[in-house]
Image: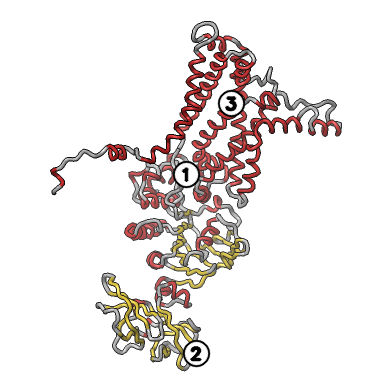
Amino acid sequence: MTGAALPRRPGLRERLARRGLDGTTLLVLPAALAILALFVYPFIEGLVLSFLPKQGGPLANYAKFFGDPYLWKTIPTTLGLAIPATLANIALSVPVALRVRRMKRQRLLTTILVIPITLGTVLVAEGLLNYLGPQGWLNRTLMALHLIDRPVRLVHNYWGVLWSLVIAGFPFTFLLTLSYVSGIDPNLERAAATLGAGPRARFRTVLLPLMASGLAITFCLSFVQAFAVYPSAVLVGAPAGSTRVISIAAFQAAYEVYDDSLASSIAMIMAAIQLVIVVLVLAGRSLFYRGPAGGGKG
Amino acid sequence: MAIHSKDFRTLRLDGVQRDFGAFNALKGISLTIARGEFVALLGPSGCGKSTALNCVAGLLPLTGGTISLDDRRIDTLSPEDRGFGMVFQNYALFPHMSVARNVGFGLAMRNEPRARIAEKVAEALRLVRLEGQADKLPGQLSGGQQQRVAIARAIVVAPPLVMMDEPLSNLDAKLRLEMRAEIRRIHAHLGSATIYVTHDQDEALSLADRIVVMRQGEVRQVGTPEELYTRPATVDVAEFMGFRNMLPATLDGAGGGARARVTVDGAACEGTPVGPLAPGAVTLAIRPEDLRPQDDGPLAARVDQVEYRGRAFFGIATTPAGTALHFRAPSRVEPGTALRFGADPDRILIYGGAA
């Protein structure tokens, strides 16, 4: 009982450690600085700039954007590309991932499927032009076979861009989906089978609910990527018409009209739309089961 | 309304084989299980016992042989069409469903009306003594409770056959004893057949009506717990059933009759032959608990170590020839003492061939 009479105030280091702050916490600093410099600062500068239009009050740019159909219609155009492309990628990824998960040479197949990620959108767009363009292999073959008399228009329209988004986005979506699918204990499916659930019922009652929250995250990440589509919208799309996406509008404002303030406003609108979609999806995610996908003690 | 298993007479496995590439995990298993029977598949890991269970469940296709329920061949059916209940080693509870939905899953897949599902689920949860837990998620339950849910889920559909794959191996010792009694009680209540896979001979001895000892993909012996405990058919079954002393000896004279004389370490000794014996090298099998210090015992050895295990002392001694003897002593013996050891001739089993 000798120490009981000496109330001692713990040192600063000890008090910080109790709150989970110690030397290791400093390792967060480089990443935090990078985020501040590369993301937070430009974002704030853009936000401020967007309220300083060339003419009119602080909200003039936003008023202009939403008042001009040529500008605001880029929103539905972009969503009309990004959402179907993301959904198509998820719809493709799930069955492929379910199959790949059981394969022994998973790594080889995964490598092949992932290669497009290294190509970048520009190469994918160029590939699409080579294959599907008016003078591309497909059209030439079909004409040589006298199945068609003139080239079918497969690119330089909505479908060209959608294709390129699906091709470029698939590897990313697939990898994320595969990791969620692989996390599901295979015994759960076996248990469901012994209880009388056929393949469809097993997918509906066991796999899908356990994947749902992961698929929501996958949707958000893939959607954000697809939403910023620019190169393929220009290269394989109709940038003045059906694929005039919001990033084209931002680009034109910045580098053709030289209105930095308007371009910043458009960037802010883009950010807001992405944020709304992501928040909506993540809010929906809370309806799903989010715990571990194991069946009990390992 | 109570859950009672559907009627059937026998489940028959006939030459069931399963290969994984060039590896034969099951080399032609034949076994007949009657309704109401509790059969344990016992063997060390890698002996093919879980493979056999998965074949019966339909989770692994056979590469040879047939499985039939009465006169109906079932090995070509998919698992969902067999209607057997299975309890997995890691329980495999659906983590996103409440206890009630887990237990009701099989009934829902059979499109039973909701009210009936609720009634049967309540009944099954009562049977495994988990009445108050219906609305919890599996993650909120303890290991023992999860195990009970897994059992309830497997039995609620009243399957003719319940399969359990090492269901107690993740539980602590006390809970394991409790759950053994529960499993036995539930089995008796259902009247179904149970196939229980384990590597723990205590579990198999206390639960099963019949034990199937497996090794290297083959059935080595089928018998009641008493038969297996007192009279293992072969040396390796004996070894697995706890005969830790395997001593090389020579048979004196012919091997017929209920008793045979052998020479072990230069001393004469009497034992019980298992199967026909040929003159020459034989192996004596003795359980540690049957080998005791005796002044006139045939085996001389020096005590190496002794440990206290509650009712008695167990120790290891070494013979001059260098063989280790596992023995039991009623009182403490000091390491280093030279003693003589012997056992009741009924408890000394003699197998043909060298150890």
Q: Nearer the viewer, residue B75 or A15?
A: A15
Q: Amino acid at mark 2?
A: Gly
Chain that bears disc 3: A
- Mark 1 residue type: Ala
Q: Secondary structure at mark 2?
A: strand
Image quadrant where residue A84 sits: top right
Measured in 3D between alpha carbons, the distance from the residue under mark 1 to the one under mark 3, in whole angstroms, is: 31 Å
Residue plotted at (15% across, 45% down):
A4
Chain under callout 1: A
Q: CA distance from mark 3 to mark 2?
A: 86 Å
The local crowd at label 1, few if under 14, some if 14 to 19, many if 20 or more residues have their Cα within 10 Å, is many
Frontmost residue, A87 versus A65:
A65
Name the disc covering residue A293, or none: 1
- Could you tell which of marks 1 and 3 lies nearer the N-terminus? 3
Say few, some or many: other residues with alpha carbon within 10 Å of mark 2 (under 14 / 14 to 19 / 20 or more): some
- Mark 1 and mark 2: Cα distance apart in space: 60 Å
Question: Count the marks: how many?
Answer: 3
Using the image, tell me which numbered label, if any, was put on residue A227. Answer: 3
Q: Which residue is mark 2?
A: B280
